[in-house]
Image (cartoon, coloured by chain):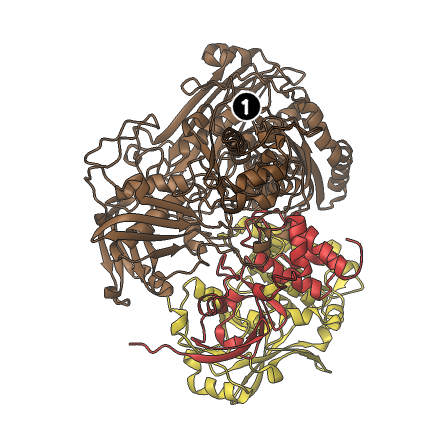
Chain colours: A brown, B yellow, C red
Amino acid sequence: MTLVGSRLPRIDGPAKVRGATAYIDDKPFAGLYGATVRTPIARGRIRGIRFLDGPDWREFVIVTSRDVPRFAVSVHAPDTSHGEAAAAAEHVDLNIVRLIHDDQPYLVRDEFRHKHEPVVLLAHPDRDIVRWAATRVQLECEPLPAVLDYRQDPEIAQIQHGMDNVLKAYTLQKGAGENAAALQAVFDEAACVVEGTYETAAQEQAYIEPQGMVAEVHFAGDKPVHVRVEGSLQCPYYVHTALKHLLNLPDDAVQVVQAPTGGAFGGKEDYPSILAGHATLLALKSKQPVKIVYDRVEDMQATTKRHPSQTRIRTALSAEGKLLALQAQVRMDGGAYVTLSPVVLSRGTIHLGGPYDITHVHIDAKVMLSNTAPNGAFRGFGAPQTIFAMERHLDVCAKQLDLDPAELRRRNLVQRGGQLATGQVIDEPIQLRQWMDATLDTLGYADKRRQHLHFNAQAVQSGKPLRRGVGLSTFMHGCGFTGSGEVWLASRVKVRVIGGGIVEVCAANTEMGQGAETVFTGICADALGLGVQDIRVAIPDTAQVPNSGPTVASRTSMVVGHLVAKACDDLVHKLEDQGLLGVAMQPAGQPVSVQAQGRGRRWPAQQLREALKKAEGLEGWSLYEPPPGVVWDDKTYKGVAYGTYAWACYAAEVEVDTTTCEVKILDFVAGQEIGRVLNRTLAEGQIAGGVVQGMGWALLEDVVRDAEGGMANANLTSYVIPTMADVPKVRVLFQEQPYGYAPFGAKGIGELPMDGPAPALLNAVAMALDVDVASAPATPEKLMALLTRGTR
Amino acid sequence: MTLLHDIDAVRPATLAEALDLLQTSGAELRPMAGCTDVLVEAHFGKAMPRRFLDLTGLHAELGGLAYDDEGLHLGALCTYAQALRDPRLQREAPALWHAASVVGATQIQARGTFAGNVENASPAADAAPVLMALDAEVELVSMSGLRRVPMAQYYSGYRQTVRRADELIAALVVPQRSLGRPGQWYRKVGTRAYQAITKVGLAAHLTWQDGVVQEPRIVAVAMSATIKRCEHLEALVRGRRLEDLGDAELRAAQALDVQPIDDVRSTAAYRAEVFARLLRQALAATAAV
Amino acid sequence: MTHRPTVRISCTINGLDREFKTAPMRRLIDVLRDDLGLMGTKEGCGEGECGACSVLLDGEPVNSCLVPAIQAQGAAITTIEGIGSPELRHAVQQAFLDHGSAQCGICTPGMIITAAWMVDKKLPPEEVARTLAGNLCRCTGYASIIEAVQAAIVAAQGGQA
């Protein structure tokens, strides 16, 4: 096998270590540079736009919302796919960023809802001059009452969405959770009831490559007939959908190409549609190619962040620590527009219940509008927030019951045949207790817990400043889109034979560092029984590749990789049908892959290569089919939310210097069951990278707001992400329980490592300091305030 | 916001040339060396001068570090990296060496200068506080000659120094009496381990004799509009025994010396609390030697 | 009409003598990328925090976003294009490939500049994290980078990785 279980080196590695990979700002470009003028306050109406002295405005191309038709006749059929009211074909305002709900404009027309909302676009041949010129445009605004704290219910004057600023709400209930009185009865009778409120802050993706996009428009006379955009992005078809509506052009008139992308983590899932729209509007008006690349400050101020959250949890437990009931209210901050909030909240709601079998559950979740830049996707997508709350809460419960937190989990982890909070029965052969023990044993959790309790007692007595602690979290992450989301996506993949018998994988999923290109290469090679040199992966270009869905939701290897393998099977099937292959020989002793039939592996590689050389242009296709039994009810929030989950236990050891309350992470073990390790190096890299982002979120990273809700620390000096000197080497363990509907059994792992670090670390800090730290980030300032509270 | 491509710069080959330029046009000329502050300011749109005076051609006259009977002379162009490679500095001015090692990271240390740090006058400065605690003097040179200003008198206000427009820092001089003496202490509490701005810091030089503090120097960092000597604290601890110094009196003196603020990096409450604890640490650590 | 200042700069870049005219306070990163077509050096922040723009200036790693062009006069500059060659990689580049230390790759050029410097200067392997702290990475969690650089240092000193 080339890929599975290997440490196959990255296909894109050699170019990257030479600095030869051309990101969007590296590619040859001749055209204009764009800049954006943004609102200065949290909410209001634009009363005037003044172009101040300094720039020679004749040198600039200027675009405002007036350049975007307000009452167009759409060339597209009304889109009913989201279940929202179908848009009429006439009187369509093109100035809407199509995603889930039609509320966000590309450019403010009149009323705006957040600081740094885009109003005016400028283009000029000189990149420095256009940035400077953007500071010379003054927006006159009439302020309106803004809501900046999502935790408070809004006043009437602050209502901007629906009747109550609730962008989306869900209720998840199970057992007595379906009836308030019955649920209360469970609490009344329980031996132990524990309540807590947990908060998490916004988090900036901080990909090292800022967002950037190039747009080119081709005209027939004055009419645009083709638009090509290329840029740093995760989901070319999302951008394609957004642009075709903005420009009111047919599907094949819009082409979106992904450039090598320097990190994304969800931050380049939906925002690039806006950036592409801006670049295209300028290219349309100027009739020249336009490039917009954000500098770090603008990127941080204007683009999406992780949703802040506040979760109230109340649990009823037996005297032995068995969870009987879970009641929770989740509140998230969606920012000014809906964007992806319904899906973020969904994932958060479903994951709150954790890998525990709890009979009675009632969760009310809502995401609120606030007059801040809209929040969006960031690795984990709602789950880290609620998992943080639940896992912190369980430690609080353990403390109340005088139980080791690991033991409390041992008594509650779901087993095969048990149910998650959605009622989903787990029929995988999971061994969560065993896998938890593997993590804990690797850390030395039991010994360290004992030693550190003793160490802390001594330190308190002798007045020494250091304290130590260990903490854990147990959790799962659903792979792929929720419920019937994958069916709705209807992903398609093709593999085609290009010159020289090379097989090219054509999918819309993007390489952004996680190794997708290498994984697809390896899956294809293994499905065909060929080598890496026989395979290419096409650049994700909507003119060349079918829509295999977005690169999000931990779906690329598991869902799309599976489709790659099946497309390879289809290709071989066609070769066989065309008689290009001789008599099939069953190779002796070849391992049969778990799910991908590996039809190609029935043929000796050389024979297959010969056949491919004669089959240039031949294509193999696959279309997504759901695994049996994935039935999910969106209205009741019950059923099989995900076909499978990756399961994990993370454990941390920390040392806190109470002089300053700085937290040093001494050790960290990330143990997870992920179906099948496709490539050990890539998988370890994903886990280690996600864990360190989680460490940042737990201890360092905070989005500080100014009086207008804008990001006050919008630079890498003041928004603090971990350096190499801030984190230990993360120790990674894998368990494998192959999943039947995945390539070679591999589950998704992209987001999983984001869920566990924050609660594990804060649980360790809570043990070290003997305080109930309930919000992340646990900055030294916060910890010091907790320690000194009541003593001064 | 001045565009970088509109700003001029001149790079004299000799110190005399530089001083002559400063004499004639000092008001609109700004000296630059490592640029680790200057270009960051430009990036964030701060006001820029019309012209910069690039000092990096003057290594012969302003570079390096040297020792003599007077003490340690850090040339204006001496970088942190150069200082870190000096074993004698590590031995005789360990707090200064430590301060240099926690400025930024490798790339900043390769370019940043002690003189630049002093002149930049940030309230959260890295090496400058230690220089102040060690009684260093700023040697200023101009066409009119040389003068020395003690670090303790170098700052006249928020981001303001007493350097005249026609002057350059020639060197920073750490007196012999401060070198090789025990009792040097520096701790920077930053936003993270490296590449960090100081949130609260303390540089001290505390010599003990017979269990009693002799000539205390206590410098507060990021606790005020400038780095500064804490005169009330120094007066309080002078001649006192460690075990006699009570928390309440220390905090009261601290409150007279420094009134920290909330900002994007930290809070007043945290800064005040941690500074008090750092002081305790500094006293205990230096007394124990 | 403002007259833009210019200076003539002579320096060596990746071992080759180069001469160019530019505004004295333009950033070295812009000269490298926009004037000389050396796109390997990346801008991640513009404020000297991320290190993606690292180059060697007279033998030391610096942030090229914080070097004004006038200071390139007479200097020896090495960019990522000057580290190793397509035929023969620097030990650190090979180690990065072996250990999977490049993911999205945007921090990689700057990281390799500093790492190659460490190897060539024979700095101690236990200093890797501290020395590379000025090169931020958001993808890898750093472990694979530290392993690669340590392995390259040890190998260069003739030891076992």
- Element assignment for label 1: loop
Q: Horizontal and vertical percent for residue A155?
A: 32, 33
- Res. A176 visible in picture: yes
Image quadrant assignment for residue A599: top right
Q: How many labels does the image show?
A: 1
In the image, residue A124 sits, relative to residue A377, either above or below, namely: below
Which amino acid, mark 1? Gly
A150, A752: nearer the viewer: A752
In the image, residue A138 sits, relative to residue A85, either above or below, namely: below
**Residue placed at 36% from the left, 45% from the top?**
A255
Q: Horizontal and vertical percent for residue A365?
A: 44, 26
In the image, residue A217 sits, relative to residue A52, either above or below, namely: above
Q: Horizontal and vertical percent for residue A650?
A: 65, 34
- Res. B157 visible in picture: no
Placement of the C terminus of chain B among the 4 image quadrants: bottom right
Describe residue B281's horizontal placement relative to residue B166 as left or right: right
Image quadrant assignment for residue C88: bottom right
A144, A219: nearer the viewer: A219
A192, C120: nearer the viewer: C120
Describe residue A115's horizontal placement relative to residue A590 as left or right: left
In the image, residue B176 sits, relative to residue B38, either above or below, namely: below
Q: Horizontal and vertical percent for residue B114?
A: 60, 71
Residues packed near mark 1 inside 10 Å, few (<14), some (14 to 19) or many (20 plus): many
Describe residue A133's horizontal placement relative to residue A667 as left or right: left
Placement of the N terminus of chain B among the 4 image quadrants: bottom left
Residue position for label 1? A353
Chain letter belonging to callout 1: A
